[in-house]
């Protein structure tokens, strides 16, 4: 079976094909089809050839990718893989909800949008709720999208300032070995937050906001004793907050403020035996009105494809280790009872 998809722009076709045709080669490999460009008197298009079912899936994927290309965005192999995952699962209808809304524009003119259904739901949760807990593996855009929403809220005058904070887990002797004053010592812990702000605002603009105190980046310990009104507050790497710190942070919320808490419960750096405040908060706060708990999956990973594979490999390893530990515990219990 053959299917010709007509496109109005040769530039869009180039974006769909990707650098050195990497995107269409990916579609060909996963679906077992042949894809090529076609130009004739009627215009430009993409020709798909192969088994009927595979061609139908490839057509659905390419039509969605054409929509992304039409929005002047580059198309990564990660996006192609995600679109193919959704199409193969019969969820292509849900793709229509992704990428419509631009959160903000970076200093390089790049639009920041949700790239997966999980990211779209996360952004919607932040819009609709006062407190959102975003939980999931590395590379899912938890922090980056939260910062983008904070920048948008500041630009739209919905809040008067942005406050970004992280627990400095190693705030004991190791911090003391770092050179400089206290700000220099804590900067390495806050660097990912600076990077996100620089990309969206530019270093010069960020510095102006910092001087006017409309942006504050500080370790979690600095939040104690404060009431934060008219602010967009982000607690990043919250899996490293203790239960006491988490309660302290959540009770800082003032009038006209919004808080986003992000973390990965599989990557806690707390001392052995110390409970994560994020894990406890998920159990305590579920079901409370105006608080949303959003969980990302490996499918929401928007970094290099290998990151997704690494996460899955670790999940598999940890499940096996947990099963083995449970089996050993049962055997010990059996011997004692015997």
Image (spheres, grey):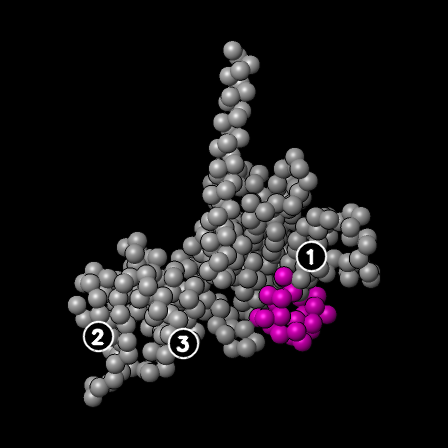
**Element at label 3:** helix
Asked if marks 1 and 2 touch (Cβ < 8 Å), the reply is: no
Q: Which mark is residue 75?
A: none
Instruction: Kindly identify the residue that appears in the image at 68 percent across and 59 percent down.
Output: 190
Q: Give the mark toward the camera: 3 or 2.
A: 3
**CA–CA distance between discs 3 and 2?**
21 Å
Please state, as top left, top right, bottom left or bottom right, where the N terminus lies in the image: bottom left
Instruction: Kindly identify the residue that appears in the image at 43 percent across and 69 percent down.
Output: 76
Q: Give the residue at mark 2.
A: 4
Q: Give the mark toward the camera: 1 or 2.
A: 2
Can you say whether 108 is above or below 282 in the image? below
**CA–CA distance between discs 3 and 1?**
38 Å
**Element at label 1:** helix
Which comes before the other along the chain, label 1 or label 2?
Answer: 2
Residue 75 image position (x, y, % from top left): 41, 71
Instruction: Kindly identify the residue that appears in the image at 49 percent across and 44 percent down.
Output: 315
Residue 223: in sight, yes or no?
no
Within 10 Å of disc 1 (Cα), the crowding (few <14, some 14-19, many 20+) is some
Residue 112: in sight, yes or no?
yes
117 magenta-colored: no
Magenta span: 192-214
Q: Give the residue at mark 1.
A: 189
Of residue 318 and residue 16, the one placed in the foreground of this image is: 318
The chief SS type of the magenta part is helix
Q: Give the mark toward the camera: 3 or 1.
A: 3
**CA–CA distance between discs 1 and 2?**
52 Å
Q: Give the residue at mark 3.
A: 20
Within 10 Å of disc 3 (Cα), the crowding (few <14, some 14-19, many 20+) is few
């Amino acid at each position: 079976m053959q299917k010709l998809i007509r496109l109005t722009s040769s530039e869009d076709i180039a974006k769909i094909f990707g650098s050195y045709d990497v995107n269409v080669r990916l579609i060909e490999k996963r679906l077992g089809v042949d894809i090529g460009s076609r130009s004739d008197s009627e215009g430009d298009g993409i020709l798909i050839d192969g088994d009927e079912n595979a061609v139908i899936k490839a057509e659905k994927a390419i039509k969605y990718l054409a929509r992304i290309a039409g929005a002047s965005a580059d198309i990564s192999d990660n996006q192609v893989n995600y679109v193919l995952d959704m199409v193969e699962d019969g969820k292509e209808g849900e793709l229509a909800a992704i990428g419509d809304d631009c959160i903000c524009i970076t200093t390089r003119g790049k639009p920041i949008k949700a790239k997966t259904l999980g990211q779209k739901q996360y952004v919607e949760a932040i819009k609709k709720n006062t407190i959102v807990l975003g939980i999931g593996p590395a590379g899912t855009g938890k922090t980056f999208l939260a910062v983008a929403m904070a920048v948008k809220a500041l630009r739209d005058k919905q809040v008067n300032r942005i406050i970004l904070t992280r627990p400095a887990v190693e705030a004991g002797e190791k911090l003391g070995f770092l050179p400089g004053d206290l700000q220099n010592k804590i900067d390495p812990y806050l660097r990912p937050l600076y990077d996100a702000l620089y990309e969206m605002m530019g270093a010069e603009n960020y510095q102006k906001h910092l001087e006017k105190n409309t942006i504050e980046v500080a370790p979690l310990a600095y939040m104690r004793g404060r009431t934060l009104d008219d602010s967009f507050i982000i607690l990043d790497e919250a899996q490293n907050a203790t239960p006491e710190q988490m309660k302290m942070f959540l009770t800082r919320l003032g009038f006209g403020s919004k808080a986003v808490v992000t973390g990965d419960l599989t990557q806690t750096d707390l001392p052995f035996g110390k409970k994560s405040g994020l894990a406890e908060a998920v159990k305590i706060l579920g079901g409370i009105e105006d608080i949303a708990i959003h969980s990302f999956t490996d499918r929401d990973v928007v970094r290099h494809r290998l990151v997704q594979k690494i996460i899955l490999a670790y999940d598999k390893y940890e499940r096996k280790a947990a099963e083995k530990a449970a089996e050993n515990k049962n055997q010990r219990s059996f011997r004692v009872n015997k």
